[in-house]
Image (cartoon, rainbow, N blue to C red):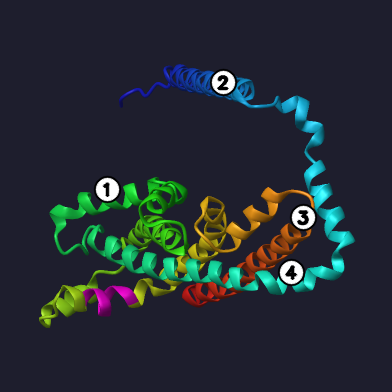
Amino acid sequence: MADITFGDAPDSVAGIQSRYMEQVQKRRLYGGLTLLIFVVLMVSGFNIADARNAGGFWEGLHQIGDYPADVLSEAWEKRADLPGLIAKYFPALIETINIAAVSTLIGVIGGLFLSMLGTRGLAKWPRMIPVFRRLSDVMRAVPEIVIALVLIFVLGGGPVPAMIAIAIHTAGALGKLFSEVAENADLKPLEGLESTGANWSQRMILGVLPQVAPNYISYALLRFEINIRASAILGFVGAGGLGYELRNAMAWGPGRFDEAAAIFILLFGTIVFFDQVSSRYRNRLTEGQTQ
């Protein structure tokens, strides 16, 4: 009967433990070096930005609350005028919401096509998948404000450049998100539709969209919230809407701070309202999908 010895077992366990500890130490070392490099870059970047700034950060830090205090004090003194000012700037708010709504709708349609044409297993032209994916990357990589500035130079100021800029960025962002959702779609319905002679459009509409519609709608609602903020921000560069009125009120300084406060109230209330409504419907879609 053969002898079975376990003399090497302790050495093997000790060797495994030592190699494991070496790997742990290497990871800690690499993690510490990465953290150190990050801190050095942050500190150096802050120092460079502070040196190039018109005023020092630390010297002006104590004044950070001066502007909000001036706005609030003037708004409180003229609080009786706030309802009238809110009514005055309400059309600009409607314009901001319209910019966000139209750009979201166009962006959803563009993102839908980009996702269907750039998803493996669903694309009509599989060899063109990298092209549509890179196109989506480029569209969402360029900030809306950069696109808007270029379009304002070409088309002039107004809501149209803002709408196009936000729609381009929305299509790129949703194209990526929609594609990730579509990759998890069940392909069996597509095979069944293909066996009946359905073309590519019919397979996408009947076989894919019913599966991914809840997530698509959820992402579209989330993007609508983001686009309301973006449309207000783009108003600062002359793209119209509530942001344009806010820039003018802030530029005049004291004497029109009550108008800036009224615009802030409108903008904050609108963002909170649509955030709550959108979150409610997105939760419903998510819960309905999981049940």
Q: Nearer the viewer, mark 4 or mark 1?
A: 4
Q: Nearer the viewer, mark 3 or mark 1?
A: 3
Residue denoted by label 3: 257
| Helix, strand or loop under label 2 | helix
**Looking at the image, is 127 positioned above or below residue 60?**
below
* Residue 122 in picture, x, y percent from top left: 22, 64
Q: Which numbered disc covers residue 134?
A: 1
- In this picture, residue 70 sits left or right of residue 135: right
* Residue 140 in picture, x, y percent from top left: 38, 50
Q: Which numbered disc covers residue 85?
A: 4
Q: CA distance from mark 3 to mark 1?
A: 45 Å
Q: What amino acid type is highlighted by mark number 3?
A: Phe
Residue located at (27% from left, 48% from top): 134
Residue located at (42% from left, 17% from top): 8
Q: CA distance from mark 4 to mark 1?
A: 46 Å
Instruction: Categorize mark 3 by other alpha carbons within 10 Å: few (<14), some (14-19), many (20+).
Output: many
Q: CA distance from mark 3 to mark 4?
A: 11 Å
The boundaries of the magenta stretch are: 203-209
Instruction: Categorize mark 2 by other alpha carbons within 10 Å: few (<14), some (14-19), many (20+).
Output: few
Is 151 part of what is drawn in magenta? no
Residue denoted by label 2: 32
Q: What amino acid type is highlighted by mark number 4?
A: Leu
